[in-house]
Image (tube, rainbow, N blue to C red):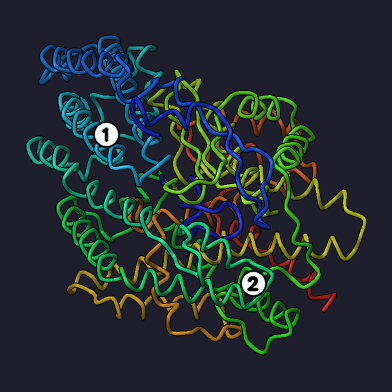
């Protein structure tokens, strides 16, 4: 997954979390397209993924056969075991979970294919129909499997422990059972759970699709040009301030014309979440996400408090310096990602980006680089620019029996190199964790950002340590600070915005104007007095997909960045013997271990309030160094 703002320095993001049929998949068959580089001239060809390792096309007979097989096996599975789990021995239960995993992986492969097809071109109506039809079929099939998790959570703890104690085979599934039972207090009756499961395709998923298709079909008119949202947002980092200002005005106008629709989507999904949360007895809107992340509400509160308390020494201080560097009395929102005056706005060719990232990975771990190299040796990456493609970037794990795919929109800028380092980290993590199998390979979002942010840090540190020119080093350091502010400060501000919005939605529907007020409130708080925000910035909340697809996801980026700052500090200090092996073991663990267990070998504890300060101090130290040159 990627950060929640499409054009924030790396990675540029859409989530979170995700081409076409017989005549439609040809452009995505592993060929290359000639994109435009940042300067508008023809650049080197960029890779386009080949999805045939999943299925050849939506009409592939293998896809239909897999769905038919999953349906047949799912029905037989339910007929044989529904209502009988309590009477199974530990070994028999282990066998049942193994069969459940096999069926779920078949469905996961199909849904991964559908998600990637849709991400490849959301403007093609056939892709939308295919994805929706696939969702409906998979949801219907998986309803036959729902009994397993519901029944397991109705067994008391003592019964589960007895089964585990008598069965080494079941012990393999202990982490999955542990995580499943986190949701036990929030489980509803079987009938309600089945209803909610089956109605998902006409509920939240349908609103998600409406949002995605609306964004994909939008055109932003800048002067005489009609640009996609992604291309228009990219201009907010142009060297020419008049270009940035024109892009900002046009983006505001484009989203302003659709703001009633985006407000309806947001209000509807927030109310839907409130209804479900009340039925499930979650104490607050973010609690369900925290349970899914296997992290306590109190740990998230400590992170949010630490970051908000640090706004003045981090973002406020940095952007005051940036205003001076740019010679401006105040910054506008379109100046936030502006290049610094001395920065060379050169396009970086794709082969150079690949070499930079892999060399940085290799300097830390040859094994890490070898796994990363597979993504470039094989057609597992889609980096080309084209209309209809999902904006931003993501890494999709698909299923362990296949491999991950990466989506990027490569504009040839330095931030795109860091985006590549970030998404490749996700991909490598997903490959290593895949050995755990479909049910155990998934990593909570808070830990899923570890490898991605660590990959960014490896790439940045490798470049910084090799740079001898003080002026160039300063520019690199400033760029990294902006990346970290976008990852930590900005994401916590987004989390704060979501919290305010969902809390207020419980008192009634919010107008577009009120949503804008909440948005502007958190922007002023987080970015500080260096900015003089124009009123039209109030609509910019509307293009951030994580608010729609993955409510309260965004703090995971700050969690991951602070975690990696602390982890990388341990690595640089050389205090932990055999760090590389322990780090790779952390990635291989997938979802089998919690954050306390994973961080213990490195002497770190995320439940300690000082842990977050340690991560934030790294950003502050970079700003200290920059401040010395002002």
**Residue 161 in view:** no
Is residue 101 or residue 254 the one in the foreground? 254
Q: Which residue is mark 1?
A: 130
**In this picture, is 171 found above or below 201?**
above
Q: Image quarter for residue 52?
A: top left
Residue placed farthest to the left in the image? 191
* Mark 2 crowd level (few <14, some 14–19, many ≥20, 10 Å Cα): many
At x 36% / y 28%, what residue is drawn?
Answer: 23
| Foreground tag (2 vs 1) | 1
Q: Which residue is mark 2?
A: 314
* Mark 1 crowd level (few <14, some 14–19, many ≥20, 10 Å Cα): some
Residue 564 % position (x, y) = 63, 48
**In this picture, is 600 found above or below 400?**
below
Residue placed farthest to the right in the image? 468
At x 23% / y 29%, what residue is drawn?
Answer: 138
Is residue 100 or residue 305 the one in the foreground? 100
Residue 450 % position (x, y) = 58, 43
Residue 384 % position (x, y) = 56, 42
**Residue 477 in view:** yes
Is residue 556 or residue 177 the one in the foreground? 556
Left or right: 1, with 151 as reference point: right
Decide which of tag 2 and tag 1 comes sooner along the chain.
Answer: 1
Element marked by disc 2: helix
Q: Image quarter for residue 380?
A: top right
Left or right: 292, with 610 as reference point: left
**Distance from the alpha carbon under mark 2 to that under mark 1:** 46 Å
């Amino acid at each position: 997954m990627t950060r929640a703002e499409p054009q924030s320095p790396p990675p540029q993001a859409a989530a979170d979390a995700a081409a076409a049929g017989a005549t439609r998949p040809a452009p995505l068959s592993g060929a290359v397209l000639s994109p435009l580089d940042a300067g508008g001239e023809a650049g080197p060809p960029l890779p386009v993924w080949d999805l045939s390792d999943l299925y050849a096309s939506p009409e592939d007979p293998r896809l239909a056969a897999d769905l038919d097989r999953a349906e047949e096996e799912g029905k037989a599975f339910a007929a044989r075991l529904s209502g009988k789990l309590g009477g199974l021995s530990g070994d028999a239960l282990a066998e049942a979970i193994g069969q459940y995993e096999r069926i779920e992986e078949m469905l996961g492969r199909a849904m991964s294919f559908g998600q990637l097809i849709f991400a490849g071109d959301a403007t093609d109506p056939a892709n939308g129909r295919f994805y929706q039809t696939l969702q409906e079929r998979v949801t219907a099939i998986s309803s036959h499997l729902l009994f397993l998790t519901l029944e397991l959570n109705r067994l008391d703890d003592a019964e589960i422990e007895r089964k585990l104690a008598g069965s080494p085979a079941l012990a393999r599934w202990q982490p999955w059972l542990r995580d499943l039972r986190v949701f036990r207090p929030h489980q509803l009756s079987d009938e309600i759970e089945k209803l909610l499961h089956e109605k998902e395709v006409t509920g939240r998923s349908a609103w998600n699709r409406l949002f995605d298709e609306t964004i994909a079909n939008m055109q932003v008119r800048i002067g005489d040009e009609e640009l996609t949202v992604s291309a228009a947002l990219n201009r907010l980092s142009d060297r020419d301030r008049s270009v940035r200002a024109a892009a900002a005005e046009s983006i505001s106008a484009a989203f302003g014309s659709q703001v009633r629709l985006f407000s309806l989507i947001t209000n509807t999904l927030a109310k839907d979440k409130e209804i479900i949360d009340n039925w499930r007895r979650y104490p607050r809107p973010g609690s369900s996400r925290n349970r899914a992340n296997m992290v306590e509400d109190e740990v998230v509160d400590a992170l949010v408090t630490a970051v908000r308390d640090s706004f003045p020494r981090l973002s406020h201080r940095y952007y005051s310096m940036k205003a001076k560097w740019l010679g401006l009395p105040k910054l506008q929102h379109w100046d936030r990602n502006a290049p610094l005056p001395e920065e060379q706005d050169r396009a970086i060719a794709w082969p150079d980006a690949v070499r930079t990232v892999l060399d940085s990975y290799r300097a830390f771990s040859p094994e890490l680089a070898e796994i990363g190299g597979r993504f470039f040796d094989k057609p597992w990456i889609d980096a080309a620019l084209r209309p209809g493609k999902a904006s931003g970037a993501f890494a999709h794990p698909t299923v362990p029996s296949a491999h991950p795919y990466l989506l990027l929109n490569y504009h040839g800028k330095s931030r795109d190199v860091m985006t590549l380092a970030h998404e490749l980290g996700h991909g490598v993590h997903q490959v290593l964790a895949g050995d755990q199998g479909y049910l155990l390979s998934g990593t909570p979002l808070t830990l899923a950002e570890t490898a991605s942010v660590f990959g960014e840090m490896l790439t940045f540190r490798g470049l910084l340590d090799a740079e001898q020119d003080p002026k160039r080093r300063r520019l690199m350091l400033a760029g990294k600070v902006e990346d970290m502010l976008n990852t930590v400060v900005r994401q916590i501000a987004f989390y704060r915005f979501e919290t305010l919005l969902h809390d207020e939605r419980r008192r009634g529907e919010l107008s577009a104007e009120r949503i804008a007020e909440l948005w502007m409130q958190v922007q002023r708080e987080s970015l500080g007095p260096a900015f003089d925000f124009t009123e039209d910035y109030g609509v910019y909340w509307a293009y951030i997909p994580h608010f729609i697809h993955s409510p309260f996801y965004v703090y995971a980026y700050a969690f991951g960045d602070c975690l990696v700052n602390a982890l990388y500090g341990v690595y640089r200090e050389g205090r932990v013997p055999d760090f590389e092996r322990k780090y790779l073991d952390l990635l291989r663990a997938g979802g089998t271990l919690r954050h306390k267990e994973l961080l213990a070998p490195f002497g770190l504890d995320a439940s300690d309030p000082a842990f977050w300060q340690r991560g934030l101090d790294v950003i502050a130290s970079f700003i200290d160094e920059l401040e010395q040159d002002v």
